[in-house]
Image (tube, rainbow, N blue to C red):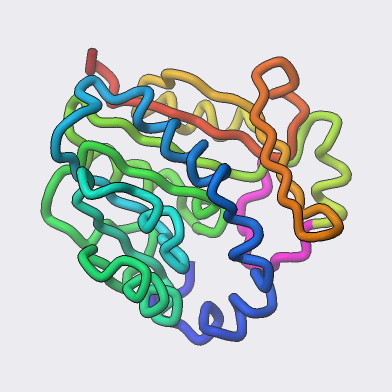
Amino acid sequence: MTVAGAPGFGRQYFETAYSDYERQNPPWKLQFYRRLIEDSLEHPSGRRTILEIGCGLGSFLASLDARWSKYGFDVSAYAVGRAREKNPGAQLVVASGTRIPFARRFDAIVSFDVLEHLADPGAALDEVAQHLEPSGVFAFVVPVYDGLSGPIIRLLDHDVTHLQKHGREFWLRLASRRFQVLAWQGLTRYLLPGGVYLNWPTTIWRHHTPAIAVVARLNGSR
């Protein structure tokens, strides 16, 4: 990925590639993301720590309640600035996705539509493994380019920063080398005419959806 704060991920990038960022992150989608981790935590109550890799404009962290101590980082200084406005109590810094800039472990680490931007996603997962509590949860979402939707996704994907265009088996194998995959499902998401955002998770059709959501725990953890 580009160096932290690089102009390629500045305001123009977000206003061009993610001009519908807010509409693409409605409350029900963020609630689904929260359930990915909360349903898998061994101790769902009490004070918890969470790290978001590639926090973007900070919508997901802002959706979490006061039980969470929030940390995050993004390659874009512009995005981190916007995220800080939404999350005044969070620890947010500018950093590359392949190296976690916090010297601590977390109860949950999440990465939503970020790993596909990295030149070495395996190195990023190594970092996650080193910074996750033994009973902690790692959740990530990535686009996939196989199955029935694969040809369409390849045709529609014009984001030149998507360096990893793989099928779902690539990501599942990558995660399984470091973690125990607890669950994974397919995601169909699309901004419909009129500004309505579709975010449909499925296990039945998960081999043919344009994206997947994976929840995992460190190998050897209960």
Give coordinates of residue 47: x percent, y percent.
Answer: 14, 39
The one nearer the camera, 35 or 210, is 35
| Secondary structure mainly formed by the magenta segment | loop
> What is the span of residues highlighted in magenta in the rendered image?
157-167
Give coordinates of residue 120: x percent, y percent.
Answer: 46, 53
The one nearer the camera, 156 or 191, is 191
User: Is 83 positioned to the left or the right of 187 in the image?
Assistant: left
Q: Is residue 167 above or below residue 104?
A: above
User: Is 45 positioned to the left or the right of 40 in the image?
Assistant: left
Q: Quadrant of residue 85?
A: bottom left
Give coordinates of residue 41: x percent, y percent.
Answer: 28, 25
User: Is 102 positioned to the left or the right of 140 in the image?
Assistant: left
What residue do we see at 65% from left, 18% from top?
A: 203
Q: Is residue 64 above or below residue 215?
A: below
* Image quarter of the C terminus: top left
Magenta stretch encompasses residue 159? yes
Q: Quadrant of residue 122?
A: top left
What residue do we see at 24% from left, 54% from top?
A: 70
Q: Is residue 35 above or below residue 10?
A: above
The one nearer the camera, 156 or 65, is 65
Give coordinates of residue 99: x percent, y percent.
Answer: 30, 58
Count of numbered tags:
0
What residue do we see at 46% from left, 82% from top?
A: 6
What residue do we see at 55% from left, 81% from top?
A: 8
Q: Is residue 134 above or below residue 140?
A: above
Magenta stretch encompasses residue 118? no
